[in-house]
Amino acid sequence: MTIQDIEQQLLDASVQGDLNTISTIILSLNESQAAQINPLVYDKVLGQLSLPYIGADPADTIRIVMEFASPYISSFTLGGVLANLAWNDNLGGLDAVIDNLTEVHLLPYPYGGLDDFTVSNVLDALVSNVQWHMNMGDDITAHNTAIRDFMEILGGHVTASAVGEALANLAWYDDLEGLDAIIDNLTAEHLLPEYQGGLSG
């Protein structure tokens, strides 16, 4: 089977939502094959997996793709994937991506890393989901854990204005664990005076 055949199978399976086929193909690749796959194929597969789903949760498949292919996936694509997963409230998928970000993805945006405004949008989504679940009377433990995990890895990519808004919203809803998850992971930049780009007073 050629690399082109493998690429087409991955694309077809992602459009069809065939999680087993995607996982099977990815797990069967050797290091050389994984490197030869067109990065745009990985981008498209992850993009499909990050969309709202009706059947099985794609989180495990997302983790498999990320574990094998994250070095070949662009920061631009991953920003969109993270935002989709957060707004779709797929905490497992979000965790699968965050756990497998590379050093390149975590670089400042001008040097190839994730875009700060896109990452800030992810925090906004997580906080919005907390508010929705609290309004529904749901347990939010998993969501607060997701906020902490997110901030531990990506807090440095969240703008001070987004952090300030998240803190205000969580405080309004009396979500002390969520507040703690953010405050514990504030960066030196967040703590600068407002006129230097830090949190608003």
Image: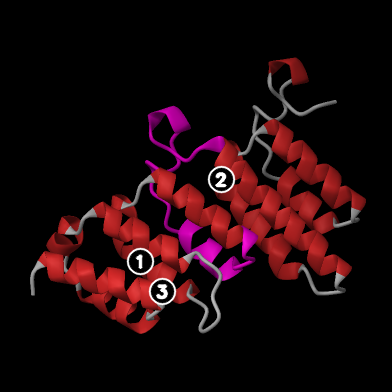
| Residue picked out by circle 2 | 154
Residue drawn at x 35%, y 60% as measured from the top left: 44
Quadrant of the rendered structure where residue 32 is? bottom left
Residue closer to the observer: 22 or 189? 22
Q: Residues within 10 Å of mark 2 (few under 14, many from 20)?
A: many
**In the image, residue 94 lies in the stretch drawn in magenta:** yes
- Crowding around mark 3 (Cα neighbors within 10 Å: few <14, some 14 to 19, many 20+) is many
Give the residue drawn at x 38%, y 35%.
Answer: 112
* Count of marks overlaid on the render: 3
The answer to the question of whether label 1 and label 3 lie on touching residues, with beta carbons closer than 8 A, is: yes
In primary-sequence order, the first of circles 2 and 1 is: 1
The numbered disc on residue 65 is 1
Q: Amino acid at mark 3?
A: Thr
Mark drawn on residue 182: none
Give the spatial CA distance, label 1 vs label 3. 6 Å
> From the image, which quarter does the C terminus lie in?
top right
Tell me residue 80's x, y (percent): 49, 51
* Mark 3 → mark 2, Cα distance in angstroms: 22 Å
